[in-house]
Amino acid sequence: MNSLISRPRAVTSDTSANSKLSRRGLIYSYREGAARVSAAQSLEERSSELAAGAVQSVLQAHPEIAAYERLVASCARDINFFIKLIISALVYGSTQVLDDYLLIGMSEVYRALGLSMSCAINALLYIKHSHRLIEAEAQLTNEYIDYIISGLS
């Protein structure tokens, strides 16, 4: 797992060498936290646009879904849920929320409903390539999206 998703380093004793490391660790944690919060805010602002685009992407890749209003509604609901969980993971700085609320049991639910995991993966890839985040924000967000895709594959 990339170091950007790891937990911040613990602050240690007050010796000169450790103090410098601690300050660097704190500065890094602060910058990473600021990038995560900024990415979460940007995703929240664009969530409706991203969800609508992701639904269209799924419907283009799987036109058979369009014939069933209920499946289209379920698809839209799930995509909005994915976005909310990605935002939560960014805010918390952890994949735990993704594991607890998304990855554990999702494949079983999709199989039981006769849905393809490729629909979810298609939607996530659309979000990844369309979120318009920059630099550190994009990298952090894409790591969480890739984590979900890997867990669903």
Image: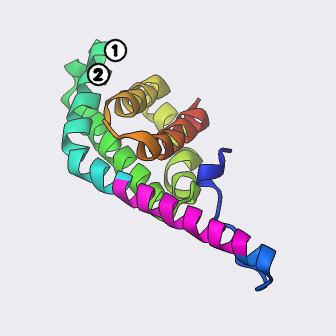
Kindly identify which numbered label has been placed on residue 100. Answer: none
Residue 62 appears anywhere in the view: no
- In the foreground, 86 or 74: 86
User: Is 36 within the magenta?
Assistant: yes
Secondary structure of residue under mark 1: helix
Q: Residue at x 28, y 50 (%)?
A: 42
Span shown in magenta: 20-38
Amino acid type assigned to the residue bearing label 2 in the image: Ser
Residue 7 appears anywhere in the view: yes
Placement of 95 over or under 48, stated as above or below: below
Task: State the image coordinates of residue 130 (x, y, percent, origin top left).
Answer: 31, 30
Q: Report which quarter residue 59 is drawn in.
A: top left
Mark 1 in CB contact with mark 2 (< 8 angstroms) = yes
Q: Residue at x 26, y 37 (%)?
A: 50
Placement of 101 over or under 144, stated as above or below: below
Q: Which residue is mark 2?
A: 57
